[in-house]
Image: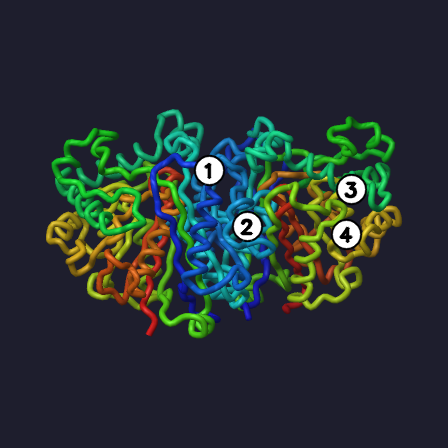
Amino acid sequence: MSSRVCIVGVGQTHHRGPGGNLAYHEFAFEAARAALEDAGLTRGDLDTVLASGWDVLDGRTISDMHLVPAAGGYLKDSAKVADDGILAFAYAYMRIASGAFDTALVVGHGHAEGPTELVSNVALDPFFYRPLGVGVTSSLALQASAYAAHYGVSEDQAAGVVVKNRRHGANNPYAHLTSAVTRDEVLASKMIAWPLRDLDCRPQSVGAVAVILTSDDRARRIASRWATVEGIGWATESYYIGATELWRLGALTSAAQRAYRMAGISDPVAELDLAEVHDITSYHELMAYEALGWAEEGAAGRLLEEGATSMEGRLPVNPSGGALSTNLEAGTGLARVAEAALQVTGRADGRQVEARTALAHGMSALAGSIAQAHGVVILRRSE
Amino acid sequence: MPRRVAIVGVGLTRCSSWRRDVIYPELVYEATSPALQDAGITPNDVDAVVYGSMDPFDGVNAPEKWNVDACAAAGMLGKPYLKISTGGTTGGSAALAAYYHVASGLYDVVLAVASQRVGETLEAQLVLNTAVDPVYERGFGVGAITVAAIQACSHMHAYGTTEEDIALVSVRNHENALNNPYAHLRVKFSVQDALASAMLSWPLRLSDCCPSSDGACALVFASEERARKLARQPAWVRGAGQITDNYFTGDRPWYEDWDSLAMLARRVYRLAKIDDPMREIDVAELYNAFTIQEILEYEALGFCEKGKGAELVRQGVTAMDGQLPVCPSGGVLSTNPIGASGLIRVAEAALQVMGKADQRQVPDVKTALAHAWGATIGFHTLMILDREAP
């Protein structure tokens, strides 16, 4: 490996609900601008810009035509990872680790102009799955119900995730939803796709997030504190729902094992101080605890109930409020990385926890059949 | 400095306007299987996979998810799998992504795959029109062919390039395609035939435009240590890069010259230590979706001075038996599965360097250049391959 890779800048918009009069590349501009200011850099300091997202969801063919120049990439070397932003972060990591580039900006945005259920339905093959009407919510519900049935996880336990994350989100001035909810409110909310109720599911948010990565050498020259990427891994699994153990996030386990190995982490609960996971549903946060090796299979609910993953617990999860408070679709995983970087550099303000090592997780939510691809990033505070 | 990286395996599919004989994973497997075979490896040897496609041109969104098994990406371990979409440059960008996977030191053997089923698109130009701004430019019908027509008008006006010149580009490419069993259009015609074909967007006739194709392509990239073991003659990456121009078509004042490509060429030639491209490059696979663009590309890539591109065509310099043969494969003019076309350029350049291009082989190729453009001419990618490690 030529060089260690560091995060020296984070920028995000004040995320909100759909509507408003800004186009998605205008959000990208706002986030990129904030990240450059945060890093004390200008557009000219960037060597490469990586965008993320799905054209079909954006309603724009080649969305990076707009995103990249808006994010400082004019006349630069760019690419778009057509997936969650955490995978664009992985690509930026490789570009810098290769030594070919010094400084990269990664941008993720949420500005769904297409109906997410239809967009996810047409991502399925036209022969077997598409005619069944499967979309993102129904496939996530299949996983959630299989998980609940397999391990006896109750609706009450899942509601606990929502209560925790929405309470955390109230501390985050950038979050879309900043109101806490009670367990009763969650359990009384409308059933969307059994066992998922309205509040178990992510909202639809608009906004963008940008992260600036640079080499170890340059970080030392330009920054006083930064986050070092200690581990990174990403993985996929089978497409066919019938070939997958629905109660496990297998690809997340593969991605985490790679990242832990690279970071030299053998006991994640003891060694991690904080995690930002892609809680696309409340059940998926619990499934993530297990896939990430923090709890025995089926035991995630107990970890939650002990309060281990609350702000005050030994491994706080989603101090930002997570995707249940702000869902930027393809920007969601990158937002997890951004929040983890803010935490380890001690800049998370009202949502700050004491953290030296943090994990960020993102998933390919709207493409494929059932949360098919995942990415994991491990960050550590610079010494 | 990045680690040395080489291409050690190539797989191409047959292309046609609608490959209705295969479902999508089968089409992709038709490319990945021979690529692995060519490299002499099994799916287990692949450390990571990069997939390129332009989803809005397919009948299925995010097709890489469905095609995961055909790319050897799933399985017990769950491999790293990265999806790239950058318009017409998608295939070129996928090659770059695979290159950086290996150059970073994270992975040793990486499979790059790109595919497109334009046969599932009702009208590709309408899809491309949604790429441009809905307020200012979409209503003018901006897309690929309209922008290429502006390039043609400007070049003809500025430099005196003629309709006969661009017709000759078409004739040459289609002649070359006759030697390529993977090409979509394999028809022989004359300059007179070309000039008699239907006018689509003045001055571009049917013969000046690429077809829309179904097809896929796969390449195996490897680290130096693995490449030396896997291939008798690897195609070493000597230099590569991408450039991003501005977004509004109307904000680009020069259509007779392709300045963004010229800028990228200077950067990549510096990386590859190339001073005189005409002398040092033995064959070039250019993204000639429209005939006029091949002429602009000659100039931007420094094969000749500005305005002199048509002379290279007239003098036969870029013909199969010329000093610098361009598109022995028949180019994008003969075959265009959009998201795969850029990777096919890299594949064809690699085959030339490896000496495996069969009927379309140019004798004694040491250095080959592969180009792609995309995003209503806003993006370019370049990759220079060589017989010798850099």
Q: Position of residue B59 (x, y in %)?
A: 51, 31
Few, some or many C-alpha atoms within 10 Å of disc 3 (few <14, some 14-19, many ≥20)? some
Which residue extends farthest top? Answer: A131
Q: Amino acid at mark 4?
A: Tyr
Q: Which badge, 1 or 2, is on the more N-terminal residue? A: 1
Give the residue at x 43% y 31%. Answer: A122
Residue holding disc 2: A69
Q: Which image quarter is the C terminus of chain A in?
A: bottom left
Q: Nearer the viewer, residue B297 or B117?
A: B297
At 42% from the left and 74% from the top, the residue drawn is A220
**Real-space Cα distance between discs 4 and 3?**
16 Å
The answer to whether the residue labelled 3 contacts the one labelled 1, judged by CB atoms less than 8 Å apart, is no
Res B369 → quadrant: bottom right
Mark 2 neighbour density, 10 Å: few (under 14) some (14–19) many (20 or more): many
CA distance for labels 4 and 1: 35 Å
Q: Report the residue marked by disc 4.
A: B298
Judged from the image, the secondary structure of the residue bearing numbered disc 3 is: helix
Chain containing mark 2: A
Residue beneath disc 3: B154
Asked which secondary structure carries label 2, the reply is: helix
